Structures are given as structure tokens and as C-alpha cells.
Image (spheres, rainbow, N blue to C red):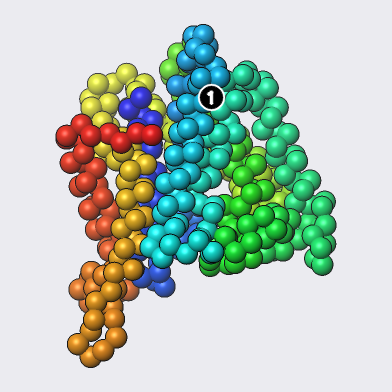
């Protein structure tokens, strides 16, 4: 669907934007993650990706399984795909220093791969009621583990950085192979993969709704209503259970972000695939085309942007007065001198980086080069 590609492209554009500022010390608040509890625009991006992969999985695997395709073969194919995505993410972490003793094992692509691997049998073998039950069970189990199981030397239910149950498990299982900025916890850790899987399964349910024999306008209305319901549930769970927290992927965060994903996707869906007004649809299609182009090579754009960002920091040049300066700082230097303030120059660099990545995506689109795994 055009709307799904556009939503995917919107999300990858947002991820490239927030991951590549000119100066990490000068950011608009919405372009960085919440410090701990709470959320910003940046905190919407990762769950949007998981939601999108869930929708795509339902539209592809679900349809093939319902048509009588060989289910074990489907699962084997998806397992190979998940392993390849995991490997790409791990290689990005491995670069550029190749330090096997401290390389980070988790990551964004690794979590997407793991969730996809875990979700595939649920999508293939379970109907929507069973899927909904699994989501509820996972969120309940996660809540019990985080709130009731005591962490040695700390106690139960402490949801502070590095002190929660998930961080304790990560330290035992991952050791030195965690997020280098914290070293005591990882935002893509093992335990928080459970509610992240739920974010993907909510996308699966949305995809199955799109396959239902229901008028598209009605589909849109119900997705919008469901989105508003999830936003309300996220706010309620934030108050009565656990706070909204991206690093912990708390149930309130999972529900809230599912709500936003449904609202945004339903808007794309109505504008690009449903609305009955040709002039409006044509205008929306022109406006959304850059996102569609981005979305058709999303994995490639994400991986390449991450690789380039690492290289910009790794490649260094000698300075006339001694010392070295990175390629990234050299590229940012003329922008930093503009008289628009440090926050705006940092944002301008991110926008120009995004424009460069889009130019590559546009070239690939023109050549009909689509990288898939």
C-alpha cells in the first residue's frame, strides 16, 4: 500500500533526522529522547518501526498462511531474514573498532530481528483472539517481573536507571556487551523485548484488520478510534502501573505509542489509499512521494546512515596546529559559523544529512533498485 510505504518513509526520515545532529549538545527537546520517564517525538520512532513491521508481516505472512502456504517453510524463510537483519545491526555495532570484547550485542535492528523471529509463529499459527491474549500475557508477565521480582542489593519495583529487573538480567547475560553510554543497562535489553514484541503484534492486528472484508472508510474510522483508546490507556497505565518510559519499554509506553502509530497510519491510509476525492488524493500523493521513496529502501537507508555517521566520527585529519579533527566536525564547521544559533545550526546539519540520504534513496528509486532481505 502507498500509505504503508509513506508511513515507513516518514519514520525513517525521522530516525535519520534525530540520529545525525551537528552537535549532540545543542538539540531541540523534541529531537532527543526523554531523559528517563516521559516521551518526545524521538521516542515515537522506534515503536513506529515495530508497528510497521507488524503490519507488513500480517499482510504478507498472514495472507500466505491463510492461502495454504507451507507454514514451516514460511517460518524458516522469516528466521533467515531475521538472522540477516540481526547480523547487519551487529556489524554496525562492530564497526569501526572491531573490539570483540566490548562490542554491543543489542541494538535497533537486533531488536527488530528478534521481535520478528518471535512474532512469526504467532502470526502464522494464531488467530487474532489468541494474538490479543498473548499480548496481554506478555505485558502482564513483564509488569510482574519489573515490579515484584527483587533485584539483589536493590529490591523489587525500583525503576531507576540500572536498578530495574531488566538491567540486572542484562548485566548477567550481556556483561560488557551493553550500551556504552550506560554500561549498566541497555535500552534494547533482553527483558524489555517482551513489550517491544507487543508493539509489533499490535501492528500485526492492524494489518489483519486491513485484510478484513470491511469498507476502507470504516477501517480508517475504527483505526482512529482504536488509536485514541490506546492513547487513553497509555495515560491510565502511566498513572496506575508504570510510567511512560522508552528505555524500559513499559506497558504504558507500548500502549501510548501504539495509539500514536494507529492515528498517524490511519491518517496516511485515508489520505493516500481511501479518500474518494481525486484532487485531494493526487495532492496527498505528491506531498507523500518523498516519504514513499524513502520507505521503499528503509533498511538500506537506516544501515547506510548509521555507517556514515560512524565513519564521520572515525575518519580524522591532522590539524595545522597539531591534533586531529573528525570528518564530521569538518563538515559541520562552516554550518556552525552561520548566525542562526547553535540549536538551529545543529538542526540544519541534520536536515542536510537527511537530504543527502534522500538523494541516494531517490536515485535508487529511479533506477528501480530496491534492497530487500
Q: Position of residue 205 (x, y in %)?
A: 56, 25
Neighbour class for label 1 at 10 Å: few (<14), some, many (≥20)? Answer: some
Extreme-bottom residue of the structure = 321
Q: Residue at x 49, y 36 (%)?
A: 82
| Figure check: 182 above or below 69 | below
Q: Residue at x 23, y 27 (%)?
A: 282
- Image quarter hosting the C terminus: top left
Q: Position of residue 183 (x, y in %)?
A: 59, 67
Q: Quadrant of residue 330?
A: bottom left
For numbered disc 1, what is the local secondary structure? helix
Q: Residue at x 67, y 33 (%)?
A: 135
**Residue 221 showing in the rendered view:** no
Instruction: Say whether residue 299 is left or right of residue 334.
Output: right
Q: How many marks?
A: 1
**Residue 372 showing in the rendered view:** yes
Q: Residue at x 21, y 39 (%)?
A: 364
Q: Quadrant of residue 11?
A: top left
Q: Position of residue 14 (x, y in %)?
A: 38, 49
The residue lying toward the viewer, choosing from 177 and 185, is: 177
- Image quarter hosting the N terminus: top left
Instruction: Say whether residue 82 is left or right of residue 304.
Output: right
| Figure check: 196 above or below 127 | below
Q: Position of residue 219 (x, y in %)?
A: 48, 20
Give the labeled residue for mark 1: 75
Amino acid at each position: 500500500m502507498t500509505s504503508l510505504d509513506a508511513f515507513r518513509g516518514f519514520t525513517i526520515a525521522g530516525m535519520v533526522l534525530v540520529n545525525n545532529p551537528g552537535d549532540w549538545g545543542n538539540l531541540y527537546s523534541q529531537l532527543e529522547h526523554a531523559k528517563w520517564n516521559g516521551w518526545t517525538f524521538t521516542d515515537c520512532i522506534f515503536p513506529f518501526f515495530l508497528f510497521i513491521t507488524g503490519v507488513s508481516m500480517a499482510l504478507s505472512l498472514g495472507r500466505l498462511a491463510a492461502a495454504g502456504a507451507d507454514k514451516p517453510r514460511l517460518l524458516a524463510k522469516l528466521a533467515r531474514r531475521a538472522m540477516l537483519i540481526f547480523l547487519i545491526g551487529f556489524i554496525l555495532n562492530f564497526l569501526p573498532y572491531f573490539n570483540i570484547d566490548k562490542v554491543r550485542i543489542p541494538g535497533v535492528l537486533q531488536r527488530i530481528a528478534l521481535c520478528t523471529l518471535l512474532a512469526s509463529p504467532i502470526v502464522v499459527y494464531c488467530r487474532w483472539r489468541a494474538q490479543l491474549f498473548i499480548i496481554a500475557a506478555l505485558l502482564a508477565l513483564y509488569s510482574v517481573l519489573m515490579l515484584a521480582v527483587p533485584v539483589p542489593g536493590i529490591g523489587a519495583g525500583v525503576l531507576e536507571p540500572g536498578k530495574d529487573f531488566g538491567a540486572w538480567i542484562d548485566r548477567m547475560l550481556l556483561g560488557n556487551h551493553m550500551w556504552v553510554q550506560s554500561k549498566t543497562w541497555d535500552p534494547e535489553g533482553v527483558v524489555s523485548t517482551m513489550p517491544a514484541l507487543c508493539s509489533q503484534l499490535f501492528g500485526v492486528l492492524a494489518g489483519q484488520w486491513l485484510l478484513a472484508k470491511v469498507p476502507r472508510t470504516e477501517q480508517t474510522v475504527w483505526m482512529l478510534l482504536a488509536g485514541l483508546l490506546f492513547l487513553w490507556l497509555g495515560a491510565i497505565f502511566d498513572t496506575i502501573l508504570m510510567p511512560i518510559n522508552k528505555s524500559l519499554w513499559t506497558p504504558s509506553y507500548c500502549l501510548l505509542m501504539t495509539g500514536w502509530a494507529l492515528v498517524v497510519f490511519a491518517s496516511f491510509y485515508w489520505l493516500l489509499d481511501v479518500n474518494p476525492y481525486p484532487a485531494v488524493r493526487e495532492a496527498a500523493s505528491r506531498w507523500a512521494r518523498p516519504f514513499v521513496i524513502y520507505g521503499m529502501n528503509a533498511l538500506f537507508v537506516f544501515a547506510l546512515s548509521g555507517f556514515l555517521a560512524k565513519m564521520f566520527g572515525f575518519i580524522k585529519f591532522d590539524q595545522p596546529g597539531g591534533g586531529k579533527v573528525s570528518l564530521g566536525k569538518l563538515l559541520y564547521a562552516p554550518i556552525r559559523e552561520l548566525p542562526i544559533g547553535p540549536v538551529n545550526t545543529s538542526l540544519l546539519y541534520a536536515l542536510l544529512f537527511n537530504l543527502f540520504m534522500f538523494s541516494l534513496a531517490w536515485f535508487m528509486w529511479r533506477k528501480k533498485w530496491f534492497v530487500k532481505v
